[in-house]
Amino acid sequence: MAQHGQRVGLFMALTMAAVLLGAPAHAADAGVEGRDAGTAATPEKDASASQGAGRCTGKANFCGVFSQMYCSSQPGCAYMFGSNMCGGVAIACEKATNEAFCKKIKGCSWK
């Protein structure tokens, strides 16, 4: 019976990863591209304006290494009670556009 539970947990983790990787970054904004008249901020402009020459580097820790208690502290990760494991896709360090957010991603550092 434990093997069945492990298979279900693995299936759920893989399904969650596939859904997260397959969804566009701004699914809610689909179809509004070009309608903002140039007012939307870009990560490159935000990073240079607010933090100077710094950038976020490193490799974000894999969600599966976190316990239930610390799972949600890694951006992009969520605890799955059905499989009793932390799953999801941790946000890549390069996606962080400021020092404060970079420091929240375990495995990343601002340089």
Image: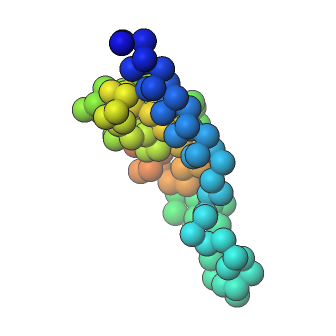
Q: Is residue 28 left or right of residue 103?
A: right
Residue 43 drawn above or below residue 65: below
Total labels: the figure holds: 0
Task: Please tell me whether residue 84 is drawn above or below residue 77 in the rendered image.
Answer: above
- Residue 81: image quadrant is top left
| In front of the other: 5 or 111 | 5
Can I make out residue 38 in this image?
A: no
Using the rendered view, name the quadrant where residue 83 is placed: top left
Tell me residue 100's x, y (percent): 41, 50
Instruction: Relative to 45, say whether 62 is above or below.
Output: above
Say which residue appears at 61% left-offset and 40% top-offset.
18
Is residue 80 rendered to the left or right of residue 18?
Answer: left
In which quadrant will I find the C terminus? top right
Q: What quarter of the picture does the N terminus occupy? A: top left
Task: Name the outermost residue toward the right.
Answer: 34
In this view, the residue in front, 42 or 87, is 87
Position of residue 9 measured from the top left corner of the image (x, y, whole percent)? 44, 26
Q: Please tell me whether residue 104 is drawn above or below residue 68 in the rendered image.
A: below
Q: Residue at x 39, y 20 (%)?
A: 5
Q: Quadrant of residue 58?
A: top right
Q: Which x, y percent locates residue 74?
A: 40, 39
Instruction: State how the image is colored.
Output: rainbow
Q: Residue furthest front?
A: 1
- Residue 83 makes an appearance in the image: yes
Seen in the image, is 85 located left or right of residue 37?
Answer: left
The location of residue 14, given as percent across then percent down, is: 56, 32
Residue occupying the point 43% across, 40% down: 77
